[in-house]
Image: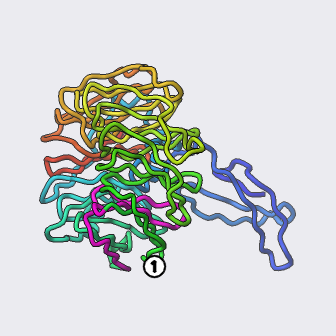
Amino acid sequence: DVTFDDQPRARATTNPSGDFSAPIRIPASALPGPHTVQATGESSGLSAQAPFAVRTDWPQFHFTPQHTGLNPYENVLSPENVGGLQVAWTFTATDGFLSSPEVGGGRVFAGAKDTMYGLDAATGALLWKHREPLADMVDSAVWRGVLYYPTTLGDVHAVRAATGKPIWTWAAGAGIFGGVTLAQGVIYVGAANGRTYALDARTGHELWRADTPSSVFPAPAVAGGVVYVATTGLFKLYALDAATGDILWTGDMGYESESSPAVADGMVYVGSDDDTLYAFDASGCGQAQCSPVWTATTGSSSQSSPAVAYGRVYVGSNDHYIYAFDAATGALDWRFQTGGAIQLGSPAIANGVVYCGSFDHNIYAQDAATGAELWHYTAGDEMNTAPAVADGVLYMGTFDHNLYAFHLPG
C-alpha cells in the first residue's frame, strides 16, 4: 500500500527481490513544502518512507513555452487572502532588474542590467552571480538543474542552477532582447539579425536557424509543434515548424510587435505598437498569409505580453490600463487603471489573481474575474518586467535595484 501523507494513493506487487513501482498522483490540495510517501507491506506490515517536496516552480517567462502566464498549480495565494501579502525579503543588486524572475528547485534567478543572480528562494541569500560586461540580461529558463540565460550581446549561457558553474555558451552574432523559450529539451530564441534559432538544451548545438527576416524582439512561444515569432520590421507573426524552422504561415499586423505571443485553446494572441491586440487561429488559415480572427483596441501601444486564463486575455498598455478581453471574441470584459504606463511589464496569473507591475512604481493584484484591486505594493522605482508566482510567493524585480519576494504572514 502506497500513501501520500497517510492518504492511500496506489497499490503494487513486489518482485522476488522486493522491488516495486507504482505511479501516484499528488493531490491539488497539497501545499508547497515537505511531504511523505510511504509504502507498507500488506502481509508483513513492514514499511519505509521517503520525503517528497511539493513545488509549484515558475521555470521560464510566462511559466510555459505557450506563454500563457498562468501557474495552474498555485494553491496558497487566492483572491480571499492576497490582500495580506507582505515583504518576505528583498535582494539589492547593483542596478535595476531587466529580466523577469524564474523559480526552480528552491532557487530564484533574475538579471539586473549586466549581472545574472542565483538566489535562495526562501531567504533571498545570494548563491552565485555572473557578470557579462557591456551586456544586458534578458529572460532566462531553468530546466533539470540547469539555468539558460541570454544577453543582449547575443550569447546564450548554460550554467548549473545550484552553483552557476558554466556548461556551454552559444553565440548568435546579433543581439538577443526577448529571452529564451524552452520546450521539450530545445531552446528557441530570436535575434536582432532577423533570425530565430533552435538549440539543443543539453549541448548548445544549433539545430536550425530560420530567417524571419525582420528583427525578433520578443521571446517566441511554442505549442503543438509550432514556434510563433513576432517581429518588429515587417509587422508580421510567423508560425515556424518546431522541428525544422520552415515557415508554415504568417499573420499580418498593423505595426511592429515587442510582445511575446501567447497560445491557448487553439488561438495565438500578440500585442502590437499600433494600439491593438491580435488573435490568430493557431493552426493558420490554410494559406501562406492569414488575417486575425479578431482584434481588440487598447488606448496606446501594447508592448506587454498577453496572459491567458479563465476564458480571458489579460494585457497591459502604455495608456496606463490593464485590460481583460474575452478570449473567443475580443470583447472588453474589464479594464483597470494604474498610475503609469505598462510597457514590457506583463501580467502573471495564479489561482484567480492577476499580478502586474506599472511605471507608477506599483505592483498590483486584481481579481481575475472582475478586475477589482485586491492589493498593491509601492516600490522605489518603475517596474518593466513580468512577476512570477511560485510556492505561495510573489516575486518581482524593479528599477530600484531590488528583487522583492512577498508572502502571507507566517
Going by the numbered disc 1, the residue's amino acid type is Thr
In depth, the one of 55 and 388 nearer the eye is: 388
Query: What SS does tag 1 mark?
Result: loop
Question: In this view of the protein, can residue 123 be seen by the observer?
Answer: no
In depth, the one of 188 and 238 nearer the eye is: 238
Picture quarter with the N terminus: bottom right
In the image, what residue occupies the spot 74% across and 49% down? 8
Q: Would you call the spot at circle 1 few (<14 residues within 10 Å), some (14-19), or many (20 or more)?
A: few
Expressed as whole percent of the image width and height from the top left, the position of residue 372 reads 36, 20
Position above or below: 123 against 159: above
Picture quarter with the C terminus: top left
Q: From the viewer's perspective, tell me whether residue 26 is left or right of residue 31.
A: right
Q: Which residue is mark 1?
A: 203
Position above or below: 284 against 333: below
- Residue 334: quadrant of the picture: top left
Position above or below: 252 against 175: above
Q: From the viewer's perspective, tell me whether residue 88 is left or right of residue 400.
A: right
In the image, what residue occupies the spot 37% across and 71% down? 162
Expressed as whole percent of the image width and height from the top left, the position of residue 234 reads 33, 48
Q: From the viewer's perspective, tell me whether residue 11 is left or right of residue 214.
A: right
Asked whether residue 176 is drawn in magenta, I would say yes
The magenta-colored residue range is 167-193
Asked whether residue 221 is drawn in magenta, I would say no
Expressed as whole percent of the image width and height from the top left, the position of residue 306 reads 39, 38
- Residue 389: quadrant of the picture: top left
Position above or below: 251 against 189: above
Question: In this view of the protein, can residue 269 be seen by the observer?
Answer: yes
In the image, what residue occupies the spot 37% across and 54% down? 219
In the image, what residue occupies the spot 24% across and 35% down? 342
Q: From the viewer's perspective, tell me whether residue 212 is left or right of residue 87.
A: right
In depth, the one of 188 and 376 nearer the eye is: 188
